[in-house]
Amino acid sequence: MTAAVLGIIGGSGVYDLPELDNACDETIASPWGEPSAPVRRGTIAGLPVVFLPRHDKGHRLSPSDINYRANIDVLKRAGVTDLVSLSACGSFKEGLPPGTFVMVDQYVDRTYRRESSFFGKGCVAHVSMAHPVSPRLRSHLCAAADAESIAAARSGTYLCIEGPQFLSYVESMSYKALDYSVVGMTNMPEAKLAREAEICYASAAMVTDFDCWHPDYANVSAQDVVRVQAANVEKARRLIARLAQDFPRDHEPCPIGSDRALDVALMTAPEARDPELLEKLDAVAGRALRL
């Protein structure tokens, strides 16, 4: 069995994880460029945990400026087997008010400025995103929320927009009519890259507002988001502490195979693969490529 290492990506407002014991920062070089920040290693209830602030401390990076490939690559190099994303979001549903956590199970990707794959010319791969979230990891998140009495939806569709602007009223009404649950700016291509790196991935989307479809939120502002997010951060820390306390110490094989996603994804014949690209893929795809 492989020992479990829990990765946490902190979104807006979650720039540190004080619950980490024996914490230390570690700078990990990536062939994909600069990650958002050094990773912070430690333990919670004896479980190895690796934390990475998605926007860096002080919220230095906008959603479009984050190097998602480098972030996932360094987490893979740090040994992460199971990855939880914490992120702020707006809600399209009256039943998901501010303060609610949504344990996402589906995504709609409307981003367009971001590198969304580790693969390409020289080594082509097509991973399945039919079920983009590891169900077992999401189940552990739901159980942790229940244990901490945190109001949480057990599923939901996350619309990822490019940003950094919020939606227009017509956009908001259109996406609401499509029955999406929440809107955010960061879970894509993060979830796609985690799948390519064979890391089990799940997301706790923390609702900060109703987006502008709602008459009480006709003009969503960053200040409104920050106010609600401050309360959400306290709940997020309790959620992660409980998750780590109850988390299996051995990595559980993913029932949908997300931790072996490359077994059926590689297209390029071994003799046609680009050695330079293979070198960059050493961490995320070394198992499947047998590097």
Image (cartoon, rainbow, N blue to C red):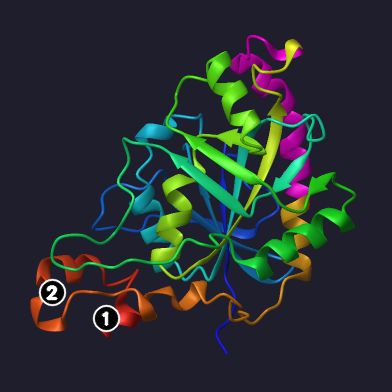
Which residue appears farthest toward the bottom when viewing the image?
Answer: 1
Q: Which residues are magenta?
A: 216-238
Residue shown at the point (63%, 38%) measured from the top left = 180
Residue shown at the point (43%, 33%) measured from the top left = 63
Q: Residues within 10 Å of mark 2 (few under 14, many from 20)?
A: some
- Determine contact: label 2, label 1, CB under 8 Å: yes
Residues under labels 2 and 1: Cα distance? 10 Å
Name which residue type carries label 2. Arg
The x, y position of residue 228, in whole percent, is 74, 25
The x, y position of residue 29, in whole percent, is 30, 58
Say left or right for 33 vs 274. right
Q: Which residue is mark 2?
A: 273
Q: Which residue is mark 1?
A: 289
Magenta-colored stretch includes residue 286? no
212, 204: nearer the viewer:
212
The x, y position of residue 137, in whole percent, is 66, 66
Looking at the picture, does residue 154 appear above or below residue 181? below
